[in-house]
Amino acid sequence: MNQNFEKLDINNNGFDFNDPGIGKIILLNLSFILIALASIFIREDRYLKNLFYSKKTTNKNYTELEEDVRAESERIDRSNIDQLIPSEPLLVRNLRKEFKKGGQRFAAVDNLSFGVESGECFGLLGLNGAGKTTTIEIITGEQKTTGGHAYVNGFDIDSEKLKAIRSLGYCPQFEYLPEFLTVNQALTLFANLRGIKGARVKRTVEEFIYAFKLIEFKNKLVQNLSGGNKRKVSSAISFIGKPKIVILDEPTSGMDPVARRYLWNVIKHARDMGITVLLTTHSMEECEALCTKLGIMVAGQFQCFGNVQQLKSKFGKGYSLILKCKTLPSMNDSSVDLLVKKVENFVQENIPNAALKDRQQQTLFYQILIDTDSNYSIAKIFELIETNKQALSLETYSLSQTTLEQVFLTFAKNQSEMVEAKNSVVNSNNRIKNDVVYNNSAYNIFYKSTVKNVRRQFSKYSIDIIYFLLIFDHCLSQLVFDDVSS
């Protein structure tokens, strides 16, 4: 102890690197601070972070696209984006997102391009796995793009994310609500987050509680609400602050018919106020009621694009004929097949331009094209079927204009066929790979398994790394200080 006091002298420099100076500790702390600041700068700076992330450029084959989809893609891709932004708050340009599965890369979103004008409700339709959710996650900034751009109110969601999301309201498919707050408290929280100040907060919350029929639940905890009322709260949050663009991902799922209709009126009112709405849903009735324009996605790309009546006229030409054969419990599969075959032969011989689109057990689905020059009319087809109903053993039948749901099911069937074909190709490739021995060099193994992983993980967990460095710095500084004191 006396030796330590002998070292302390008023003439000694306290910042000296030798004992008892603290120069080593200060230098060590400054080094870690510089490393932390450099890491944050590289992670957040939109130019330097391209060292860890770069977009791919791919050439779009316009000839493979459907006519209306090609026209929309060419309009967006070949126009000056600054000229489109004033009238179209939401723009997607050559958007692409790839994932890796089973050692192979596939495109969940395949060079998608479209624009949504102010006051328009755009329906984004497709089966599960078509790419709808991935597209929405890119637009909301939850995922990075592999290629292309998404513009929200004129701001690129990749390079200007903070500015873009200020103009965006989002109702996700699954609730992410503060469960231990009441409805009134939750709406108040998000009103404040939206930048609403003072007395306007209370007035705004009361307006939304009234507009979304939540008056009797306003003092109830969110976690105790039913699924339909939780969807109301999520939808209300997305409209708070009157954002320029609102994205609604299946907003009416779990709602009763009355609540669903009321929410439709709210969406229509928002659309009339000039708010741009992007809607995903599996309800074709909802699309017909709300959407001014829609696109059906298959394998990451639109297969059709336009308004509801345009799609019905183009892809649902003519009429839909549904025939259901009457079967008995005692009939086996072969007997049912013979009965259905009899009906098929009758339709083929007596109803011209009738194309069999689908068969589900004993039910047949036909599409009938009736030309203006044709001698056949709807009345004649009804008379023909009614006359032969008993002879064909028909239980029920219907003849109607092709619905939007039937158009959707046609594209859905195409996606199922594409998936089956793709799976067969993948399985074939896997069998070939098992028969071939690949001579991977040590460099390729090291690069693929180490360098890429380190670069990706550092970009993803840079903040965690900074925390670790600061804790390590504190512990190391404490050890050095203890050593100097002793």
Image (spheres, helix red, strand yellow):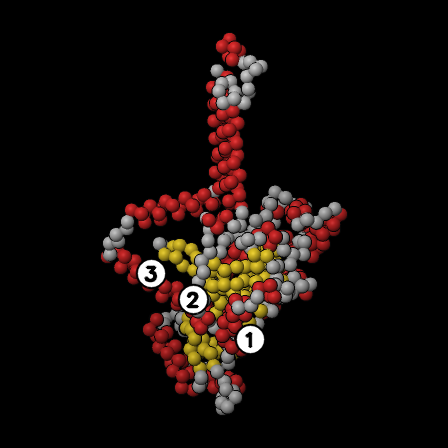
> In the drawing, does residue 401 fall left or right of residue 445?
right
Q: Is residue 385 visible to us here?
A: yes
The spot of residue 149 in percent (x, y) is 52, 59
In the rendered structure, which disc, 1 or 2, sits on the residue that comes first in sequence? Answer: 1
The spot of residue 166 in percent (x, y) is 63, 53
- Asked if disc 1 and disc 2 are in contact, CB closer than 8 Å, the reply is no
C-alpha distance separating marks 1 and 3: 37 Å
Q: Which mark is residue 426?
A: 3
Rate crowding at label 1 as few (under 14), some (14 to 19) or many (20 or more) other CA atoms within 10 Å: few
Which residue type does callout 3 highlight? Val
The spot of residue 362 in percent (x, y) is 41, 73
C-alpha distance separating marks 3 and 2: 16 Å
Depth check: 171 or 459 in front?
459
Q: Which mark is residue 310?
A: 1
Depth check: 270 or 287 in front?
270
Q: Which is in the foreground here, disc 3 or disc 2?
A: 3
For the residue labelled by badge 2, is the local secondary structure a helix, a strand or a loop? helix
> In the drawing, does residue 287 fall left or right of residue 364?
right
For the residue labelled by badge 3, is the local secondary structure a helix, a strand or a loop? helix
Name the residue at the front extreme. 11
- Asked if disc 3 and disc 2 are in contact, CB closer than 8 Å, the reply is no
Q: Is residue 154 above or below residue 33?
A: below
